[in-house]
Amino acid sequence: MFSQKVQPPATRPCNALILTAGLTGSSVVAGMLVQAGYWAGDDTARKPDYDTFENAQLVALNSRIIAASGYPDRFDRRFDPDLLAGAIDRLRGIDPAPYRDFIGCCAGHTPWVWKDPRFWLTIRVWANLLNRDGLRIILVSRESGQSWISHTLRRQIQTPRYCRAYMQGIRASLLAFITEARVPHLEIVYEDLLRDPARVTRALCTLLGAEITVDHLQTVYRGRLGRRQHGVPSMLRAGLIYAKNYPSRAQLGRPPPP
């Protein structure tokens, strides 16, 4: 139903850097690129129920950067622009050697795809080292209601307002970085990819110069295309989980629980 034909690229596809907050569907986007021939690493980080398509060495290096930044909270629980600014300042003197070595390793596997939600904290370190020629950025965001359901189903208990502010704060920070970096980019709203996959994959083809089809998406996406991931059953289940865990919810005005 959603199959499409794309002309093979005339030149080598661009490398892809996926920027996102967590639980946005970015693993599906990365997996789609892997199916189209992109290299995500010889060892990728996995969750119990799916492959994140995150290069395990990249994740370790990003965790190392976050530790050096002194960010005082979990990257996947709290976004604070003031705390981020302080973390960026503390990273100015970081030793670039291990990160240059990793970039050199990836250069032998072009085209590669990098994806890690830690990038909203670490990307400015990498930006000073990456060759931006032949690099493209994909920003993956999500509808706020769908995002809240996903967080709640993962037992990350937040008020809808807190979840929306967290996701929008990261998106705004990443858009500001993209403007500064002047790297060609495409923003994908995950629900648009699921509801109109042919249009979004065509846009990806244009951005990356790669042959990417809806068949690549269908290989990694377990649900049915043409609709949002979460419907009424998921919303009701999330509501029950939220009600049961209501006292531990993260809300604006106080830090989230550990």
Image: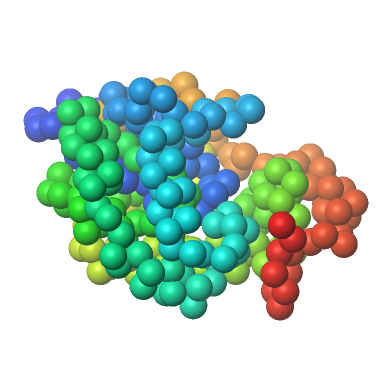
The reply, left or right, for residue 77 in relation to residue 200 is right
Name the residue located 64 percent from the left edge and 28 percent from the top edge: 48
Residue at 54% x, 72% y is 80
Q: Is residue 132 left or right of residue 124?
A: left
Tell me: 220 left or right of 254.
left
- Horizontal and vertical percent position of residue 182: 21, 63
As drawn, is 158 to the left or to the right of 63? right
Residue 196 x %, y %: 46, 41
Q: In which quadrant of the rendered view does residue 74 lie?
A: bottom right
Q: Is residue 12 above or below residue 61?
A: above
Query: Which quadrant of the figure has residue 127?
Result: bottom left
Of 7 and 37, nearer the camera is 37
The answer, for residue 244, to whether it is visible in the render is yes
Residue 1: image x %, image y %?
Answer: 46, 24
Q: Nearer the viewer, residue 136 or 5?
A: 136
Name which residue lies at 43% across and 33% down. Answer: 56
Instruction: Please say whether residue 196 is visible from this viewpoint.
Output: no
Work out which residue is located at the far right of the displayed protein and give it.
Answer: 244
Residue 229 in percent (x, y) is at: 62, 39
**42 vs 69: above or below:** above
Q: Nearer the viewer, residue 107 or 190?
A: 107
Please give the name of the residue rendered at 41% of the width and 25% of the height, measured from the top-left corner.
Answer: 43
The answer to whether 120 is drawn above or below residue 180 in the figure is above
Q: Is residue 65 above or below residue 51?
A: below
